[in-house]
Image (spheres, rainbow, N blue to C red):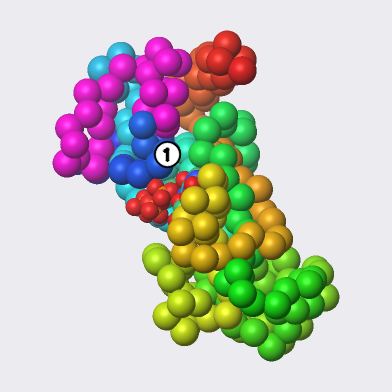
């Protein structure tokens, strides 16, 4: 079935690090869902709300294109997508509604532990493997570091130096265990991230706005209670 205009549509990650907590948060806000593992769309049984379950990378675009009303996504993915869309003339506007209390991580530059590295300038003339080329380039530009090339990888970034694909990496870190296991040392944190609740541009219908006005105070209550 296609997206109905009268139901508030919320995009969440289908399966991954944000999925469980996204669903649990919405359930804690009083919205009931019956989830079928394989289905893209999950209807709420208690409210006129639909969940669209997709890859996290698709969520910023779905919101900024106005295909869904709300999205729950990591700020890292969101900001990278925004920069990408700005560079390619796609609509890049959305409203940030709330910081969510999960999905915390940082995007960091790391180098092999035997590499010589004093400051960020040590990266000049080097190649960095990352899934976040726009966030990386913005950071390097602001820091005045020139002549750094990137190798875009959507996975296995941490093996790139060992495989001879890059001199350094710029990847997400939470505990640091993955870096450690791959003989890499974290040098610079370039972006700190957590999950966000975002809204598409444009007005919501009065029915949808009323639902959102119900959701937000509940969400604040849930997050406050578990602080
Ligand atoms: O299939 P889909 O595209 O939806 O999922 P995905 O594989 O792209 O994303 P997923 O589920 O791995 O992560 C979703 C979001 O969770 C990220 O965009 C971040 O906002 C957030 N998040 C929080 C993390 C981490 N912590 C994290 N540690 N995302 C990824 N990692 C990875 C990191 O890339 C590295 O490989 O975990 C490894 C490092 O973890 P530590 O604990 O060893 O440091
Ligand atoms: Zn992804």
Q: Residue 155's image quarter?
A: bottom left
Instruction: Say if 103 sits above or below 46 in the image.
Output: below
Q: How many marks?
A: 1
Instruction: Say if 129 sits above or below 155 in the image.
Output: below
Q: Residue 127's image quarter?
A: bottom right
- Classify residue 44 as left or right of residue 58: left
> What residue lies at 47% left-to-right and 40% top-to-bottom?
71
Q: Where residue 152 sits in the image (x, y, percent)? A: 48, 75
- Classify residue 118 as left or right of residue 209: right
**Is any part of residue 61 visible from this angle?**
no
Instruction: Say if 220 sits above or below 195 in the image.
Output: above
> What residue lies at 45% left-to-right and 16% top-to-bottom?
29
Which span is picked out in magenta? 21-43
> What residue lies at 25% left-to-right and 32% top-to-bottom?
42
Q: Does residue 53 show up magenta in the picture? A: no
In the picture of the structure, the residue carrying the numbered disc 1 is: 18
**The residue at label 1 has a CB less than 8 Å from ligand 1:** yes
Q: Residue 72 or 166: which is nearer the viewer?
A: 166
Q: Where residue 51 sits in the image (x, y, percent)? A: 33, 34
Secondary structure found at label 1: loop
- For the N terminus, the image quarter is top left
Q: Residue 106 or 207: which is nearer the viewer?
A: 106
Q: Residue 20 or 29: which is nearer the viewer?
A: 20
Q: Does residue 23 show up magenta in the picture? A: yes
Q: Where residue 77 sits in the image (x, y, percent)? A: 52, 54
- Classify residue 2 as left or right of residue 71: left
**Is any part of residue 24 visible from this angle?**
yes
Instruction: Say if 164 sits above or below 96 in the image.
Output: below
């Amino acid at each position: 079935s296609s997206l109905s205009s009268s139901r508030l549509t919320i995009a969440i990650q289908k399966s991954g690090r944000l999925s469980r907590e996204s669903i649990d948060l919405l359930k804690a806000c009083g919205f009931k869902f019956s989830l079928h593992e394989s289905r893209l769309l999950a209807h709420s049984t208690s409210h006129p709300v639909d969940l669209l379950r997709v890859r996290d990378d698709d969520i910023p675009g779905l919101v900024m294109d106005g295909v869904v009303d709300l999205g729950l996504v990591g700020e890292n993915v969101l900001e990278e997508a925004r920069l990408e869309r700005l560079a390619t003339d796609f609509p890049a506007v959305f409203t940030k509604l709330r910081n969510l209390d999960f999905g915390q991580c940082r995007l960091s530059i790391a180098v092999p532990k035997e590499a010589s590295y004093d400051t960020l300038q040590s990266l000049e003339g080097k190649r960095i493997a990352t899934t976040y080329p726009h966030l990386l380039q913005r950071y390097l530009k602001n820091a005045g570091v020139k002549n750094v090339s990137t190798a875009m990888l959507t996975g296995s970034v941490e093996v790139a130096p060992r495989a001879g694909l890059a001199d350094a990496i710029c990847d997400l870190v939470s505990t640091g265990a993955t870096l450690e296991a791959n003989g890499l040392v974290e040098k610079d944190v370039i972006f700190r991230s957590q999950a966000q609740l975002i809204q598409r541009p444009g007005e919501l219908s009065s029915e949808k706005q009323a639902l959102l006005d119900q959701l937000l105070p509940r969400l604040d209550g849930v997050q406050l209670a578990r602080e």
